[in-house]
Amino acid sequence: MTMETKYHNPVLLHETVDGLNIKPDGVYVDVTFGGGGHSREILNRLGPNGKLFGFDQDEAAKANVLDDARFVLIPENFRHIKRFLRVYGVRQVDGVLADLGVSSHQFDEADRGFSTRFMGVLDMRMNQQQTLDAKQVLNHYEEKTLKSLFVRYAELKNGGLFAYHIVQARQLKPIETSEELREIVGQFIPGHKTNKVLAQLFQAIRIEVNDELAVLEEFLQQMTELIKPGGRLSVIAYHSLEDRLVKRFMRNGLFEGEPERDLYGRFDVPFNAVGKLIVPSAQEIETNNRARSAKLRIAERTET
C-alpha cells in the first residue's frame, strides 16, 4: 500500500513547504511526519548537504521512514523537540513545519477510535504506549470535569447534559465503543446536527487524551530559541482552539495578554507573520476532504 493511499494527500503541500523558504543546505524539522508527504517535498528542495528531522509518536509512522541519508525520524512527541534534537547535536534549525491534528490514516483505522464513522473501541491515543485513553476519560472522569472538557475543547453549550448522561450510563455498564457513546448522547442532538456535534465531542475527548493544547503551547514556546533568525515556522491548524494559539504566538510570542512595552509603546516580538492566512482551494477540498478546515500560518524569526 503506498503512502498516498494509506495516508492520503498532505494538506496544503506546496504552500506549507513554500512557506519555509528552503535553503538547500539548511536544517529543517517536520514535527508531524505521518505518511511523509511534507517531508518528501522538503527533501526534494534540499541539496546534498541539507538535513531533515521528522517527529512522530505514532508507531504506524515508522513504516513510512524515508530512505534518504539526509533524513532522520525521531519517534517521539514533538513537545520534546529541543531535547531530542540535541541528541543529534542540533541546537538551531532553519525551519519547522507542523501539520496539527489527526492524520487521515488515524481517522481511517477503526480500532484507533478517532472517527465517528466506525464502530470501534474508544482509544484515541496518538501514542499507543501511553496509558490514558478515551475509555478512561469517559468512564472515570468526574461529571464536572467532563462538562468542562466538552465546553472548553468542543465549545458545546450542552456539554453539561452530555456529561450527566454519560455518567448515568456508565453506572450501568462501562462505555467501551464509539457506537455506545453515540447512543448515549445521540438522543439529545437534533438529527441534522448529529454528525457535527459528535465530531466536536470526539474532538474534545481526543484533545484531552493526547494533551494536545498543552503540547502545542510547549512546542511553540521552544521555537523562539530553536529557529535561527530569518528562519521560518509553517503551521497548519484544523480547529479554532489550535489556530488561536498559533495566531497569538506568531503575533507577539504570547498565548494570553499583551507583551510589555517600553516608554515609547514599543515591544519586541520573536516572529513576524509572513503573508496572510492561507486556506485550501475549493479544488483541494474536493479531492482531499481533510483539508476543508485547514488554516496555514507562516512566520519568520526576527533578528535578535
Image: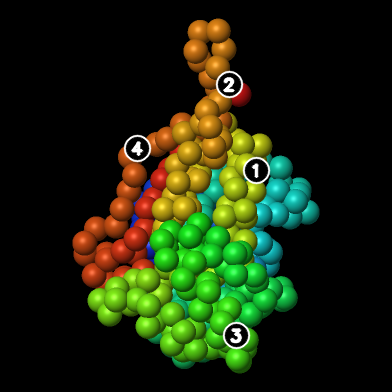
Q: Which residue is mark 4?
A: 275
Secondary element at image label 1: helix
**Relative depth, front residue between 181 and 105:** 181
The CA distance from mark 4 to mark 1 is 23 Å
**Could you tell me the amino acid type at mark 2?**
Glu
The CA distance from mark 3 to mark 1 is 40 Å
Q: Residue at x 31, y 64 (%)?
A: 292
Q: Is residue 49 visible?
A: no
Q: Which residue is mark 1?
A: 222
Where does residue 165 sit, x and y in percent of width and height?
A: 51, 79
User: In terms of sequence position, does the residue under pointer 1 or pointer 2 come before the other?
Assistant: 1
User: In terms of sequence position, does the residue under pointer 4 or pointer 1 come before the other?
Assistant: 1
Pointer 4 with pointer 1, Cβ within 8 A: no
In this rendering, position of residue 292 left or right of residue 182: left
**Residue 167 higher or lower than 249, as above or below:** below
User: In terms of sequence position, does the residue under pointer 3 or pointer 2 come before the other?
Assistant: 3
The label number, if any, that marks residue 170 in the structure image:
3
Secondary element at image label 4: loop
Q: Residue at x 66, y 37 (%)?
A: 225
Report the mark closest to the observer, 1 or 2: 2
**Relative depth, front residue between 105 and 246:** 246
